[in-house]
């Protein structure tokens, strides 16, 4: 990818364009598709997954549909190739909410029940209110930074758009860190209850 720059002072006077290169690229690594799946796991060294090449990774979620109503789409990290998903995490979370009928009070608020404080629990990305009606799902993305580092903790940021079980739009923002200096070598996604009925997750490395 390159960014165009002008070679003189104003757009109206521009006679030629140059470019800035070397700003990084997104490389597709692996796609997992749910079909009544209890979990979806990306494990280093399995199926082409590599968590040691890049300093940033992005997971994209497309229409993750829960089998069970009123659940949370969640993730956790592993430092032992997926034997345990229990990395200690501290996080923060807030969301914007508005219902279809426009008869409630829209809000933006901090979610005290969605954050973690030195917890090994799975980190929620939607809160416990994702609906399982046929037209409901969650989409979004998760950034994981430098998971192979053995010096720094593992920062993450996620944004999701989900359909509330009571027919509302929720945009969810979660960020935090896995409080470990061990290399993270696996990431797992699941619903807080029941299976992931459908949807896919793609993993990309950012150069």
Image (cartoon, rainbow, N blue to C red):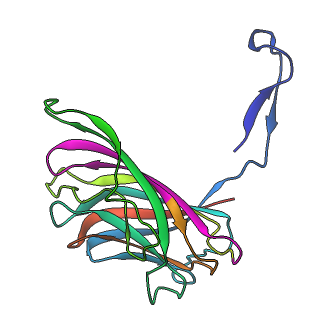
Question: How far across and how far down the image is residue 88, in percent?
Answer: 49, 76
Q: Is residue 142 visible?
A: no
Question: Which residue is found at the position 52% from the left and 87% from the top?
Answer: 81
Question: How far across and how far down the image is residue 53, in percent?
Answer: 69, 71
Question: How far across and how far down the image is residue 124, in percent?
Answer: 35, 63
Q: Is residue 92 visible?
A: yes
Question: Which residue is found at the position 28% from the left and 77% from the top?
Answer: 38
Residue 153 vs 157, above or below: the answer is below
Question: Which residue is found at the position 15% from the left and 61% from the top?
Answer: 69
Residue 108, by quadrant, is top left
Question: How far across and how far down the image is residue 66, in percent?
Answer: 22, 63
For the C terminus, which image quadrant? bottom right
Question: Which residue is found at the position 17% from the left and 60% from the top?
Answer: 70
Residue 127, by quadrant, is bottom left
Q: Nearer the viewer, residue 7 or 100?
A: 100
The residue most toward the top is: 12
- In the image, which residues are magenta? 150-175
Residue 113 vs 15, above or below: the answer is below
Q: Is residue 93 left or right of residue 175?
A: left
Tally the marks.
0
């Amino acid at each position: 990818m390159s960014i165009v720059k002008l070679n003189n002072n104003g757009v109206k006077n521009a006679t030629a364009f140059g470019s800035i290169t070397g700003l990084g690229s997104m490389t597709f690594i692996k796609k997992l598709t749910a079909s009544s799946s209890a979990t979806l796991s990306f494990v280093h060294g399995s199926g082409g997954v590599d968590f040691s090449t890049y300093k940033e990774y992005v997971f994209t979620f497309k229409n993750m549909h829960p089998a069970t109503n009123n659940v949370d789409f969640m993730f956790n990290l592993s430092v032992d190739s997926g034997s345990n998903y229990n990395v200690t995490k501290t996080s923060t979370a807030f969301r914007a909410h508005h219902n279809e009928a426009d008869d409630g009070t829209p809000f933006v608020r901090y979610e005290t029940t969605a954050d973690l404080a030195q917890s090994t629990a799975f980190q929620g990305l939607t809160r416990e209110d994702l609906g399982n009606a046929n037209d409901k799902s969650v989409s979004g993305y998760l950034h994981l930074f430098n998971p192979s580092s053995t010096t720094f903790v593992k920062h993450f940021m996620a944004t999701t758009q989900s359909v509330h079980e009571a027919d509302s739009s929720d945009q969810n923002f979660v960020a935090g860190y896995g409080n470990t200096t061990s290399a993270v070598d696996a990431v797992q996604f699941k619903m807080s209850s029941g299976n992931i009925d459908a949807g896919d997750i793609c993993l990309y490395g950012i150069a």
